[in-house]
Image: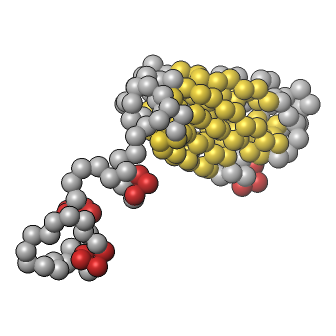
Amino acid sequence: MALTVVKTTALSGTITNAQLAGSIELTSKVTGTLPAGNGGTGRTAVTGNVLQVIRASTTTTTTTTSTSMVDITSLTVDITPSATSSKIYVIMHVAGIASESSATSGVTLQIYRASGFGTAINMGFGSTNQLGQNATLTALDSPSSTSALTYKGQMRNREVNNISVNISNDTSSITVMEIAG
């Protein structure tokens, strides 16, 4: 809604709501930065504040016999930090982990930053021969970058049997949060 003119002469002093007789079009009639508390986007980054949150999830089953790390299908998220001082907090939840049959079978999971030269930022370990087991890994990354970053979930088999995640339409997810540094 555009600003409604109440008087044709210049207003001075404090302008009241009655004088406005409507609302102010903030996108074109106000200059400068409005404080976030007043509906603006000019929030200043205070150390420790969460600046953005991005989440991806998948129900696609991934199965491997590989003892080398493989990507968990569709468990990937991209984020572009707003400052080089920002940290990226990553939470990865992998659901429905199952092995073929062996009680000694197991899976190693990791959160992997695929940007730049690629970095495994957190190694987690889980072992199961039970259907429906879950694992959650967290990591706090300091990428020192304002370029787009890709984080993904990876897994590898510790033995020779098939290892699967997201069996029975389970949902795995990866969430990244930019934390002001």
Residue in the foreground of this view, choosing between 169 and 139: 139
Q: Measuring 79% from the left and 30% from the top, which residue is drawn there?
A: 126
When the figure is inspected, residue 90 is found, relative to residue 52, above or below; the finding is above
Number of labels in the image equals 0
* Residue 71 visible in the displayed image: no
Residue at the farthest left position:
9
Vertically, is 61 above or below 118? below
Name the residue: 47% across, 24% down.
143
Q: Position of residue 145 (x, y in %)?
A: 40, 26
Q: Is residue 103 left or right of residue 100?
A: right
Q: Quadrant of residue 84?
A: top left
Q: Residue at x 88, y 36 (%)?
A: 129
Percent of width and height locating residue 47: 50, 32
Can the viewer see residue 133? Answer: yes
Q: Position of residue 13 (x, y in %)?
A: 20, 64
Which colouring convention does the figure follow? secondary structure
- In the rendering, at what x and y percent does residue 77 appear? 51, 41
Quadrant containing the N terminus is: bottom left
Q: Nearer the viewer, residue 90 or 157?
A: 90
Work out whether residue 101 or residue 137 is closer to the camera in this orientation and state it.
137
Please tell me which residue is depicted at 65% across the width and 38% down the height of the picture.
Answer: 92
Residue that sits furthest to the front in the current view: 13
Quadrant position of residue 44 = top left
Q: Is residue 171 left or right of residue 17?
A: right
